[in-house]
Image (cartoon, rainbow, N blue to C red):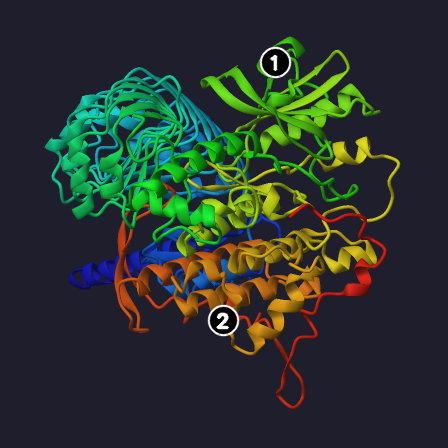
Amino acid sequence: MRPFRLPCGLGLIIYVAAIALWLVQVTAVASNADILMAIAANFEKNPRLDSWMPGTDPCSPPGWEGVACDGDIVTNLTLSRQCFSDTPADVCASRRAWPRLIGQFPQEVLYLTGLQILDLGNNSLSGTLPEGLGSLPLTYLILPLNTGLSGILPASLGNCTGMKEMHFNDNNFTGPIPDSFSRLVSMKALAMQNNAFSGPLPPFAVQDWKNLTYLNLNHNQFEGPIPLIGAMPRLQQLYLLGNRFVGSIPPQIGLLPAIQQIEIAEMKGITGPVPDVFNRIPLRDLLYIGFANNSLTGSIPPSLGELLSLELLALGNNELSGPIPASFANFSRGNLTSLDLHNNNLSGPIDVLFSMCQGKTCYYQNNHFQEGSRSTQSPVPVPIPVAPVMTSSSNVALVAAASAGGVAFFLALVCGVLFCCWKRQRQLSDYEQQKLPVETKEIVLSRSSAGGLVSGADEYSLAELEQATHNWSRSHCIGEGGFGHVYKGYLHTKNGRQLVAIKRGHPNTSRGEREFLQEIAAMSRLRHKHLVQLIGFCDSGGERCLVYEYMDNGTIRDHLWGSLASAGYIAWATRLKMAIGAARGLEYLHTAVEPPCIHRDVKCTNILLDAQFNAKVGDFGISKMEADFDAGATGVKGTIGYLDPNYVEYNELTTASDVYSFGICLLELATGKPVIGINGEGQRTNLLAWVIPLFLEGDIASVADPRMVNQYPAFSLDAFCKLALACIKKDPRRRPTISDVRIELERIEEGVLVTSSSSSSEGREVVIRPLSGDGCLSKRVMLNPFSQSDFYRRGLDYTESNSSGVSTTQDIEFNRSAWSGQITELEGR
C-alpha cells in the first residue's frame, strides 16, 4: 500500500498550492481596489471616479477609469486633464471634459508598488510629495498645473533610474534640485517652470543627463552661474528665462549638436557678450534664440547671420553696441520671421535691416543708428508681415520712407522722430483708466493670515519711489486710473536695475494698514507669466503705492485704435497670440485659487503687451482698493460696453462675467473697432449692434478689420467670432468657461498653422514647436482643427434655433435697457 501514498501526498501538495495561488490572486484584487479607494478618499466627489466601485477588480474589464494594469499589477494611474502635442484629439477632449480633482496629493500611491506612470496633471491638488515616492519604479511623473502642490522634491526620486519624464511645472515647489537626480541618466524631459525652485543648477544636470532633450526651468529662483552646458548631445530645447542666474552665457552652447531652441532671458545678472559660436551649430536645426532682457554687452556676433534655419532671434533690451553685422543680409533668404533688437545701444547704418526685413517682423527702436541712414528710429514694434496701414498722408510718407528716398524720406524722418517722442510719453497712457466694480464674495483677496503677510513682493521706501519718479514728476506720469496715477521709473529689484510702473494710490483711502498688506500678500501670490507681475509696494508716510513690471508695448487698445494704431496693423497670427495669452492669464485667476479670483474689469486696456507682444492681464485684484478710494459711489462699477448684462441687471458677479468681457475683447481684436465708439458724424456706435447681423449673414469680410487686407484664413476668423459670440450669451450658464475659451483659441491657432502650408481642409501632418517654452517636446501630430473640438461637440454654438429650425440672436443680443442710466462717461477712444 505504501507505493500509493506518494501520489496522494503529491495531490495534497498540488491542491494546497492551487488554493494558495487563488488566495494570492484574491488578495491582489482586494489590495488593488482597497488602495485605489484609499487614494480616491483624498479627493472631493468627482464623476470621473464613478467607475471606482468597491468589490470590483480595477485590473479586469471593464476596469476603472484612469487605471491600467499588467496582469494584476497596477502600472499606470492617469487622472490628468493635461494634453501634450502628441495627445490624440479625442483623448484630449475627453480629459478636458472631466472636472478637476480637488484634494490632497494621495500618499497612498506608495502602496502601488508596480506603478510606472503617475499622471495627475492639471487638477487642483495640494500638499507635498511623499519622501517614499522614489521607491516606486516610476518612468513618468506628470504633475503640472496643480498650483497647490508645494514643498521640496523627494530625494528618493533619484532611485527611479528608469525615469523618462518629470513634469512639475506651474506649482509652488521650492528648494534645490536634489543631488540624487544625478542618477536619472535615462531622463529625456524635465519641466520645472513657474515654481519657486532655488539654488544653483547642479553640474550633473549638464554632465550626466546625456539623454535629455527638453529642459525648462523658466520663472524660478535658480541662481549662480550657468554651468557649462555643452555635454548634452541630445538637448533640443533649453529654457532658463526669469531666474537669478548671473555671469555670462557659456560659449559651450555652440557644442550642442541637436539644439533647436535656446531661451536665456529676463535676467539682468546675465552679462558679457553674445557668444560668437553659432557657426558651429548645424544650420538645419537651430530655430529660436532668445537672449532678450538681460545685460549683454559688446557687438552682435556675425556668426548669427549664418543661421539660415533661424526663425526667431530676440536680443532686445540689452546693452549691445556696434553696427548690425553685414551677415544679417543672409536672413532675407533664410527662414527668419521675427528679429528683436530694440532698446540697445546699436549704431551705424541701418540699411541692412531694410533689405532683410521685407515681409518680416523687425523691432529695432530705441537705438543710436547713424543719421543719414534710412531711419534713426523704428516705429513701435508691431508684428506687421505686410506693409503698414496707409490711412493718412503721414502714414503714406512713413511707408514710402522705408522703400524709397528723396523728399518722401526726409518727410518720413521728421514724422518718425516726432512720433517716437510722442509715443514715449503716451505709451501706457491707458495703463489704467476705469474703476473696478464693487466687492464680491468670490474675490480671493483678504484671505491672508496676519503673520508673514507679504512674502512675494518687495517693500520700497517712499524716498526710493520719489527718486525713481523725480518726485512724482509730470513727465514720468503715464496714466491715471481708479487707484491713482501711474508713473514709470527705474528701481533696484531682484533682477537688478529695472524699469517699472508705479501706481500711486489716492490719498483719501480709509483702508487700514493690515487690510492693505493682506491684499498685497494675496496679489503677490498670483504669479503667472500671462499676468502683469506685482514687484513690490510702499506703505509709508500716508502713501499707498504698487510697483509692477513695465510693459514695453502698451495695451491691445493702443494698437487697435489708440495712440499706436497708426504705426501699422497687427497681423492675424499675432492677434491670436494675444488672445491666447490673455486667456491663459484669466484661466489662472479662475482656476488656480479657491474661490476663484474674478478680475471684474477685463478689457483691451487691461491686456498689456511685453517686448515680444506676449499678452499679460493687468489690474487684477485691486478692485477692493479702488472701491475704497471711491467709497461714496454706489451701483454697478466697471467699463461700459464690457459689463456682463447679468451683473448689471441682478448684481450677480461670477467668473462668467469675466468671460463675457473677454468675448467683447475678442470681437474688438477681430474687427479692430471699440465696443463703444464715436463715428465720423459724432454719434455713438455699438460694436455688437453692428457685428451680430453681419456675422449671421455670413459676411465675414465686412466683420474683419479692413487693415488685415484679407491676410487671414476665413475659417479661422469665422471660428474666432463664433467663440466670441458664445462668450457673450445673455445666460451666463451657457457661456463657455475661460478654460474652454483658451482651448478653442489654441485649436484655432493650430488650424492657422495647418492651413498656412496647405489649402486642403483635410487633417495633415505638421510639426508643432512650442517656441514659448511652454510645451513638451516637439511632436508630429495629425490635426483637423475643429472636427474633435470639445467646445463645439457640447453644442455651445453662438446661435439658438426655434421650433422651426430658424436661427435667432435672442441669446446673444446685448441688453440696452440693462445699461440705461449706467453710462456716465465713455472711454476716450
Q: Is residue 393 above or below residue 471?
A: below
Q: Where's residue 639, x and y in %?
A: 72, 48
Nearer-the-camera pick, 139 or 739: 739
Q: Where residue 456 sits: x, y (%)? A: 57, 23
Question: The disc labelled 1 sits on which kind of residue?
Answer: His
Q: Which residue is mark 1?
A: 470
Disc ID at residue 700: 2
> What crowding class fits label 1: few (fewer than 14 Cα within 10 Å), some (14-19), or many (20 or more)?
few
Tell me residue 67's x, y (percent). Answer: 41, 57
Horizontal arrangement in the rendering, residue 639 relative to residue 138 (left or right): right
Residue at horizontal 45%, vertical 19%?
495
Tell me where residue 629 sits by quadrant.
Answer: top right
Taking the image as shown, residue 603 lies to the left or right of residue 573, namely: right
First in sequence, mark 1 or 2: give its number.
1
Dot 2 lies on which element?
Answer: helix
Question: Residue pushed farthest top?
Answer: 463
Farthest bottom residue in view: 804
Instruction: State the separation of the CA atoms marked 1 and 2.
Output: 50 Å
Residue at the location (37% across, 57% down)? 68
| Amino acid under disc 2 | Ile
Classify 686 as above or below 429: below
Quadrant for the N terminus in the image: bottom left
Q: Which residue occupies the foreground of this view, 643 or 592?
A: 643
Q: Residue at x 10, y 32 (%)?
A: 280
Give how far across and how far down residue 559 sits, in percent: 51, 46
Residue 129 seen in the figure:
no
The answer to which quarter of the image holds residue 821 is: bottom right
Please give left or right for residue 380 compared with residue 359 in the image: right
Q: Is residue 574 visible?
A: yes
